[in-house]
Image: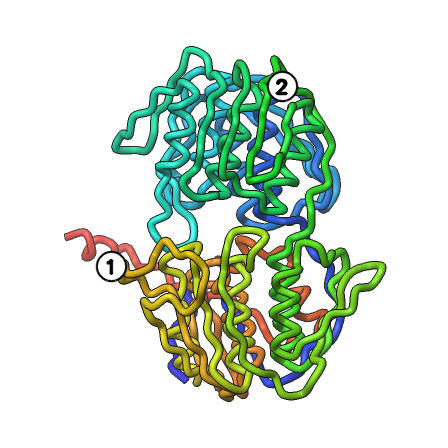
Amino acid sequence: MDTAPVTERQYKIEGGLPLVGQVTVAAAKNAIGKQLVASLLTTEPCVFVGVPRITEIDAILAMLADVGTTHVWLDRSTLWVHTPEIRSTAVGQRYSGFNRIPILLLGPLLHRARCVSVPLVGGCRIGPRPVDFHLAILRAMGAQIEQTDEGLRATCARLRGATVRLPYPSVGATENALLTAVLAVGRTTLENAALEPEVLDTIHFLVTMGAKIEVREGRRIIIDGVARLHGARHVPIGDRIEVASFAAAAVATDGRISVVGARPEPMRPFLDALRAIGGACDVEAGGLTFYRARRELTAAAIETDVYPGFATDWQQPLVVMLTQCAGVSTVHETVYEDRFGYVDALGRMGADIEVTSACLGSLPCRFRARGHLHSCRIRGATPLRGTRIEIPDLRAGFAYVLAALVAHGTSEVAGIAHLERGYADVAQKLQAIGAQFTVTEPAIAAQPSAAMSVSSQS
């Protein structure tokens, strides 16, 4: 195994053991983050129950603090937030490129302050992810937006309802429309909207705050603007991505994991794929239990899609599981065009994965014949061997940890800050299911002498 000086926290994992035990699912990162932004729409306090203690939430709270939000942790996972007034209309540049939240701040802050500046958006390295849809929605409602060297600056006299049809059912653009339309004058009709469980949960929170929102057939959402919203208490839904991650861990390692708080309804496409491979799921009063239904797993064909299709964030741990399946599996990614960069490291561990620009499936695909490497073939079953790997983004993070847990021998997994951005108490949960690993802390570098400092400046 290659070795290198430890410059950040990493996991040293002993693989090859079945994972057995129980974990409790955290609130969905992709719901609570947007709901914290929604709290800007009222001058009254809001309370959220079951909030995951992850760095993503810390960053969002820091962004909100920049504009005037105060927060208090009432206990380990209950969060009180309050924005009685907007103290600043500029979100700090230190958040440039960190995640997608800044673009969602535009609508709420325009309602409160009529002028706002936000940094460039970012997030996981999974493709360009342009903000064109977001800007079109805001402009249709009356916002004037210009791009500056630092990011985006938006102003408005008064936001008004509009009829908008999304070219693609983008989750982020749908959320932006909701956050902007609830206080806009008149009616907003959003066509071809995203209907992911996290979006519907945010709609539920907004309605609890006093918003008027109706979800109709055909991906249509009707929002009638109201004069004001009030504070609310909300329990976000469980994280279906975390549920799938531990389900894949149970099946890939031939173990048995119970996920407390998991519900089958938002997991249906994943459960169908899991059963086709040879996994099993018992639906119980308190959650879901995952294990193998048969000893030899078999190949499957998977296509990601917008809800109610197979979620794009499910495919990374699934690909690791597919390396343990007999035959040739295919995964066709139709949501993001550049999401297989993480498989190179799996290849170094012994996986046989071929990435291709072909559409390996039947779903309509925006990336057809455009040269994007958005499909892959996985030939299995292949034994994985321990090595050193570095996590490139959040969703690849759990896939790499899972690969290390499946592999024979020792793996060093660096870049765990990406993993901890989205998975709450991940080290404790891995320990609870019997994962054998240690957390290696970075070495403390020796301080340079004064002579060395002077020399380096000359």
Nearest the viewer among 60 and 371 is 371
Nearest the viewer among 144 and 48 is 144
Residue 270 visible in this rendered orientation of the protein = yes
Dividing the picture into quarters, in which one does residue 132 lie? top left
Residue 9 visible in this rendered orientation of the protein = no
Mark carried by residue 43: 2
Mark carried by residue 195: none
Position in image of residue 222 (x %, y %): 58, 27
Write down the residue under mark 1: 452
Position in image of residue 407 (x %, y %): 53, 83
Task: Indicate left or right for 454 with 132 as reference.
Answer: left
Residue for point 41% across, 69% down? 360
Q: Nearer the viewer, mark 1 or mark 2?
A: 2
Residue type at mark 2?
A: Thr
Residue for point 48% across, 29% down? 66
Q: CA distance from mark 1 to mark 2?
A: 54 Å
Residue type at mark 1?
A: Met
